[in-house]
Image (tube, helix red, strand yellow):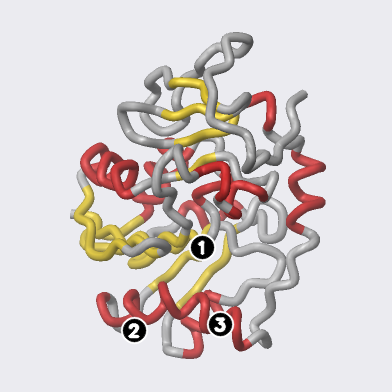
Amino acid sequence: MYQLSVDSNTELVHNDNMNGFNCPLCGAIGEIFHQHYQHCQKCDLIAAHPNQHLSTVEEKAQYDLHQNSPDDLAYREFLNQLCLPLMNLKPAPARLLDFGSGPGPTLSLMMEEQGYLASNYDVFYAPDKEVLKNRYDIVTMTEVLEHLSQPLVEVKKLVKQLTKGGLLGVMTALHSGRETFPDWHYKNDPTHICFYSRQSIEWLVKKLGLRLELVTSRVMIFRKR
């Protein structure tokens, strides 16, 4: 297997020893560059080759290292990048699902403190699938989208759980092109396998018939029509 880290001193190159694969977002065959990453010309997604994905055990071991906590004021401030605009767009009370809440659920607690009715789901740490049968006014995915091997499939499911006019709030860092990708710290986490740009987000909005309420370099809020 190839090393997961990218040497920033190595130029982006084509690799004829690896075939392009179906883009995890739009399904088009992309262009392999720098050993094991693919760039999709259709939706601008950059994705790691499937043979670089960690096993479930390896993936959970990485998440177990996370030390996010509701008591961490810096982490709360980080999450406020999403929480504050969500509260402005959809005041309490409202039902919220934090999808991929992680080992130290914090966003749901922050929203509960402001009068929201919050639930958590995480495949490793809060795996109660009953919450996935309910409808919500807000669904959040904070630092989740980059981990998904089938992002379109998962986002479609979550949009179906939203009430009419409901909000999907996402946090993930957006890439600025394949030329700068090797020096980008965000790709160094071995659990990060899909990397989006503003173009990728706009493709997703059009595909799912959503309305984009907010987009920054880190935060996206979509409204279900």
Do labels 2 and 3 touch, CB within 8 Å?
no
* Alpha carbons under labels 1 and 2: distance apart: 20 Å
Q: Please tell me which residue lies in front, 132 or 176.
A: 176
Mark 1 surroundings: few (<14), some (14-19) or many (≥20) residues within 10 A: many
Name the residue that disc number 2 marks. Answer: 92
Q: Circles 1 and 3: CB distance less than 8 Å?
A: no
Residue visible at 28% across and 58% down in the picture: 222
Q: Where is residue 85 in the image (x, y as percent from the top left)?
A: 32, 77
The answer to whether the residues at label 1 and label 2 have Cβ atoms under 8 Å apart is no
- Where is residue 172? Give x, y as percent: 47, 57
Looking at the image, is mark 2 or mark 3 nearer the viewer? 3
For the residues marked 2 and 3, what is the alpha-carbon distance in whole angstroms? 19 Å
Q: Which residue type carries mark 2?
A: Ala
SS at badge 1? strand
- State the residue position of label 1: 142
Name the residue tied to disc 3: 76
Residue 123, position as x, y percentages in the image: 65, 51
**Dot 2: what SS?**
loop
Q: Is mark 3 on a helix, strand or loop?
A: helix
